[in-house]
Image (cartoon, rainbow, N blue to C red):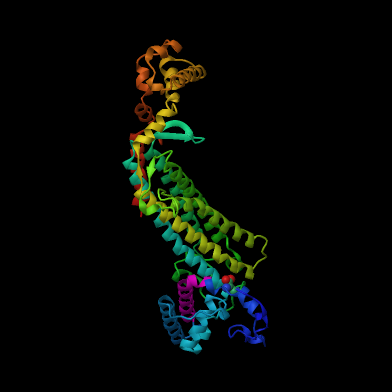
Amino acid sequence: MTHGNEKTDKKSASPIWGGRFSGGPSQLMQDINASISYDKTFYRQDIAGSIAHATMLASQNIISVSDKDAIISGLTQIEDEISTGTFTFSAELEDIHMNIETRLVELIGAPAKRLHTARSRNDQVATDLRLWLRDSLVNLDAMLMALQSALLDKAETYADTLMPGFTHLQTAQPITFGFHLMAYVEMFGRDRSRLADCARRMNESPLGAAALAGTGYPIDRHQTAGLLGFDRPMANAMDAVSSRDFAIEFMAAASICATHLSRLAEEIVIWSTDRFGFISLSDAFTTGSSIMPQKRNPDAAELVRAKPGRIIGDLVSLLTVIKGLPLAYGKDMQEDKEPVFDAEASLSVAIAAMTGMIEDMTAHAEPMRRALEKGHPNATDLADYLVSALNIPFRDAHHVTGQLVALADEKGCALEQLELPEMQKIEPALGTDVLDILRLENAVAARTSFGGTAPSEVRNRIADARKHYLDSQ
Ligand code: ARG
């Protein structure tokens, strides 16, 4: 967009607020001021807010019932025009509120001019954004539930599939793939609860706060709050028009959720490499290379891995706008919307792509098993056996196990492939039962502590999680 000599263009003053102006704003003023290109996103919420407001004004005898009826039928027609794409938006009318109000005057004439009684765009925009975000949170919760459901199904399928559990991305202890996936079911469960908490806290109505100080008209804020499904009106008019912590809180919760998604995405990238070969993604969630015909790239996972860059950026962007802003409304606050819309869109596409990848992915037991056999993941089990069966102090048991690991490395085999006599040269008290202990299946099956990796325990937790996360809806 160029801003050249446009500032000299003559414009006329706004029909909405231009009473005291003789000239109109410069083109540059319009460019920096207009928010219609993005705030039209919540036109439905704006219309719902206006219908509630008009209904209340009539029931309080502030406007007549016939004006209210005309306003509502005009607004209903405008909603239809916007949703079918026949509405003409104008940047000269700044924002969605003035675009709709101007059209309402065109459609129904005089009654339209009574709609803005006892209301300001300050409480109007705060109401719209809360309503929009509240609707979006319902959708995000359903999407996260679908992701949990996909993870639970895969966890069930792979509840017995052994794989290495890592610390420092080095083989640590044997686990199952189902157990690993269940970790994410819990993380997304907490994300849902953070978003639900945020939805609950934001569900108060700013409408009727007017510009900042309330109004002398006998309005009923409880009625409009009720009509719009809010729990109550916000208790302080100045807070109602000034606060955006509901939006910040949403983006903070979205950032945490995006971070969880990115960890899973990174694991998918690692697991699907040739070197790991633990999983395959379906064709639906991979892309080819324009130059290297053999390639299958996990682009969707990489994009999900990248999304926190945007979402955390959105959070920091609004925090920075609001920080140090004096009460009440400042036009700075118009900058709240794009980060919120972007965070919501980025998070929902990331959740959807992750759900698709999980639903379609196949795990490969063989490569997982081979990787597991390499890293002596049963060393801890051996040390624990020396402690419990032979009453060796843990520190000494750790040392003996270390020597057995060194012996296996020297011979280029796994711990469980050592012969008993050669093991007994290091620790004469070892009996044949150690061979059972060293079997990887047994090592996994033994970890039956609550939340542990034993397949029986993982199945219990899957059943609980299904009840807890999926049935309540
Ligand atoms: N478009 C504005 C916003 O998004 C609406 C509120 C305008 N209020 C005002 N006092 N200029 O914040």
Magenta-highlighted stretch: main secondary structure?
helix
Residue 345 in the image: state x and y as whole percent: 47, 61
- Judged from this view, the residue extending furthest toward the left is 157
Write the residue at 41% across / 24% down. 414
Residue 469 appears in view: yes
Residue 39 magenta-highlighted: yes
Q: Is residue 87 left or right of residue 436?
A: right
Q: Is residue 268 above or below residue 335?
A: above
In the image, taking residue 195 as reference, residue 445 lies left or right, namely: left
- For this orientation, the residue located farthest to the bottom is 110
The front one of 21 and 197 is 21
Query: Which span is picked out in magenta?
Result: 38-60
Q: Is residue 81 above or below residue 321?
A: below
Q: Nearer the viewer, residue 284 or 206?
A: 284
Q: Quadrant of the N terminus?
A: bottom right
Where residue 374 sits, quadrant-wise, is: top left
* Residue 329 visible in image: no
- Say how many tags the image has: 0
Residue 220: percent from left, percent from top: 51, 74
Above or below, 138 relative to 385? below
When asked about the image quadrant of residue 240, the answer is: bottom right
- Which quadrant of the frame does ligand 1 lie within? bottom right
The quarter of the rendered structure image containing the C terminus is: bottom left
Where does the image place residue 137, in percent across and percent down from the top left? 45, 60
Position of residue 217 in the picture relative to residue 155 (left or right) = right
Q: Specify whether residue 16 is painted magenta.
A: no
Q: Nearer the viewer, residue 243 or 12?
A: 12
Residue 107 vs 324, above or below: the answer is: below
Residue 162: horizontal and vertical position, in percent? 36, 34
Q: Residue at x 41, y 60 (%)?
A: 139
